[in-house]
Amino acid sequence: LEEITRSKLHFPFLCEWRNAHLFSCALRNCRHDEIKNMLDSSKDNLKLEAMKILIGMIAKGKEASDLFPAVVKNVVAKNPEIKKLVYMYLERYAEEQQDVALLSISSFQKALKDPNQLIRASALRVLSSIRVPIIAPVLMLSIKESSTDMSPLVRKAAAHAIPKLCSLDPEMKEGLMEIIEKLLKDKTTLVAGSVVMAFEKVCPDRIDLIHKNYRKLVNLLADVDEWGQVIIINMLTRYARTQFLDPAKFELATEENEQFYTETESEEDSEEESGSDEEKAKSKKKRKKKVEYKMDPDHRLLLRSVKSLLQSRNASVVMAVAQLYYHLAPKEEQQLIGKPLIRLLRGRREVESVVLTSIATMSVERPSLFEQHLKNFYVRATDPTHIKLLKLEIMTNIANEANVHSLLREFRAYVNFSDRKFAASTVQAIGRVAVSISEVTETCLHGLMSLLSNKD
């Protein structure tokens, strides 16, 4: 094996395996006192090796906080590779070792001027992790400087530091809102999600800050990372619900108006006949105004921009878009969210549970969104009880005259399941269906009466 791994040209993958194997052995055999000696060494290669071992320990969930004093001394190291790993370590343990970290504040401040953007961003993250009120003014000054940095990575770190400083010293909220206002104008996709997160945590009621940046945020959505997309979509949903008309409510009002006009048509016609031509024209114009609705262009822009995100690989993004369409889209466009949500049911069990809970809530008011997907909610024997109950609730909500007979056949099978809790819930579901659909009331009653002969 030694001879083979020497040939990097022909067997590079074996060399990678050998290096990983040696690193794993070093991680197991190296004791903390040996790592400390390596960190105190004057040789950069030993320090770098020690930091790699420490980062490996952290990645594997091992405790390495007792080496904090030895690591923090290397903040002043000139080797950029060592400095990067030192800051990665400090980001993890700065909150736990605040007293020791305080001794190196001047070094962190100097690092904010470092030519390397990664070092500047890491220094700000470490500085914001020191939860001591006395450094709040220093942190405020650092955030102000970093918010105007040329690197979007540093501006992103500044946005993440804002909520931390606000929780540390609430009196600085006004100054932080000014920084948020400046960062909201940033046109970089890397910064957008972070600054919106800061806005939501520090000043969510300052809707006026979003007005000027609304279209920019909407247009950036497709290019922002998935975490940022979820944050921005949730914020825009809240914003749009307060700033735009709800199409669903308007459609309901329009239907009621049309019904009213139909019933009172003869009365209005008789009044118009007795009046002058001008009165007739005014009456017709007034009637048109009552039912006229035109979607705001900014409202339409939002719906158009998020539509493609329904095909996202990330379940959180799809859920956020589905929520937006549920609250803000016209009735006929809401049908778009059915298939993407059903697609998520094929994912992990945790995702399936969350999606089914959301569908159960949506199906109460708008069952038509999921009626055509009934078979996707059929219960499998391998489903946990809570998943079975959620599917049962959804099937009961979307029951109608067209699918009720196939639904009752399913319920008949569920009653015989060995899961007694689920079987009892199925009996209750049959009762709900009997009440809501008069066509099958008698059939349901016969079926329920036959169950009385069961010993259970």
Image (cartoon, grey):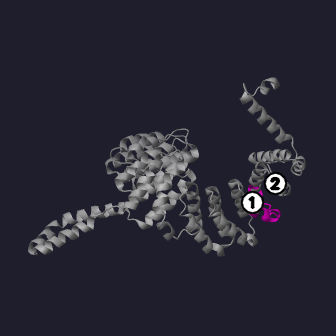
Whichever of callouts 1 and 2 sits on the residue coming sooner in the sequence is 2
Q: Residue 150 location, x and y as percent?
A: 62, 59
Give the residue drawn at x 34%, y 52%. 332
Task: Give me the C-alpha separation between circle 1 and circle 2.
Answer: 11 Å
For residue 332, side relative to residue 387 (left or right): left
Label 2: how many Cα within 10 Å (few below 14, some 14–19, many 20+): some
Marking on residue 77 = 2
Main secondary structure along the magenta-highlighted residues: helix
User: Which quadrant of the figure contains the N terminus?
Assistant: top right
Q: Please check the rendered image and state whether residue 265 is part of the magenta-colored stretch, yes or no.
A: no
Label 1: how many Cα within 10 Å (few below 14, some 14–19, many 20+): many
Front residue of 187/31: it is 187
Marking on residue 160 = none
Give the residue drawn at x 18%, y 72%. 282
- The residue type indicated by label 2 comes to Ala
Give the residue drawn at x 77%, y 45%. 56
- The residue type indicated by label 1 comes to Ala
Vertical order, 409 against 61 (above or below): above
Q: Residue 185 location, x and y as percent?
A: 53, 63
Give the secondary structure at mark 1: helix
For residue 144, side relative to residue 73 (left or right): left
Front residue of 22/408: it is 22
Q: Residue 314 location, x and y as percent?
A: 54, 47
Let me know if residue 452 appears in the view.
no
Residue bounds of the magenta highlight: 91-109
Location of mark 1 (residue): 111
- How many discs appear? 2
Q: Residue 132 location, x and y as percent?
A: 75, 69
Kindly give the residue lying farthest to the front in the view shown.
115
